[in-house]
Amino acid sequence: DAMVIQNPRYQVTQFGKPVTLSCSQTLNHNVMYWYQQKSSQAPKLLFHYYDKDFNNEADTPDNFQSRRPNTSFCFLDIRSPGLGDAAMYLCATSRDRGREKLFFGSGTQLSVL
Amino acid sequence: AQSVTQLGSHVSVSEGALVLLRCNYSSSVPPYLFWYVQYPNQGLQLLLKYTTGATLVKGINGFEAEFKKSETSFHLTKPSAHMSDAAEYFCAVSDGRGDYKLSFGAGTTVTVRA
């Protein structure tokens, strides 16, 4: 049974049109992460929530926002997608930070037209 | 800050042959090291991890990795490749203390020839 669920699997949006990607977890983990993975590149951490505390990476563009309304759900909002934002977006969870194993969802492949 | 370099973006092996994926890390503090695997159309899943203790770590599906501090390496091996090992493999590092962030390598795609 899937423990970290990302919807949708594929998302197409238009240049400049806001888009929201969703992630849910059944693990009751404290930490939820969003990674961006472009083709043939390493997954890049955008931000994470440690419980309700939001932690933004210094180089994450302001165009990317996140919400975590409760333990189970986390959303990635892209306010004005550009062509360079086309990528796979991976959600992950962990019980704690540091040495803990990450559990990943299957990802959402975002296309920007 | 920590980083990893994976040598070789693509590796092709014959079924039954040794699989060797190379990973070198850079860290100013003792690192925590991980190998993740991503099968087509799936999320990443943990193969194995090294935090402290024994430097030879065994993981799932017959994979193992050895932490070598003197070489700053954490290479992944499997003695005999199976067709089901075809996937993308990512090495990752964190310091597990101050900078919790998990930094991934660019990945190595493994193909297995019959």
Image (cartoon, coloured by chain):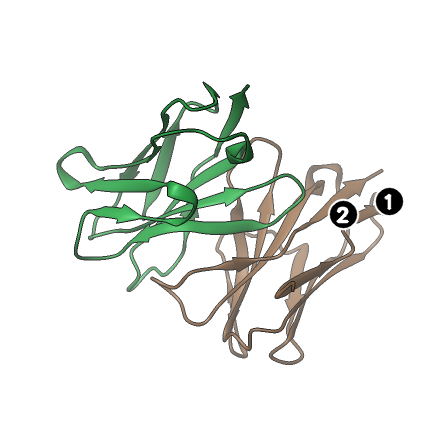
Chain colours: A brown, B green
Whole-percent x and y of residue A56?
52, 62
Please say if the residues under marks 1 and 2 sit with CB atoms less than 8 Å apart: yes
Q: Is residue B102 left or right of residue A90?
A: left
Q: Is residue A59 visible?
A: no
Q: Chain of mark 1?
A: A
Whole-percent x and y of residue A10?
79, 47
Q: Residue at x 62, y 56 (%)?
A: A105
Quarter assignment of residue B81? top left
The answer for how far apart the CA atoms under marks 1 and 2 are is: 7 Å
Task: Please name the amino acid that badge 1 sits on.
Answer: Gln
Q: Residue furthest left?
A: B70
Q: Residues within 10 Å of mark 1 (few under 14, many from 20)?
A: some
Q: Is residue B101 visible?
A: yes
Q: Which residue is mark 2?
A: A81
Q: Residues within 10 Å of mark 2 (few under 14, many from 20)?
A: many
Instruction: Name above or below for residue A23 compared with residue B40.
Output: below
Whole-percent x and y of residue A34?
58, 57
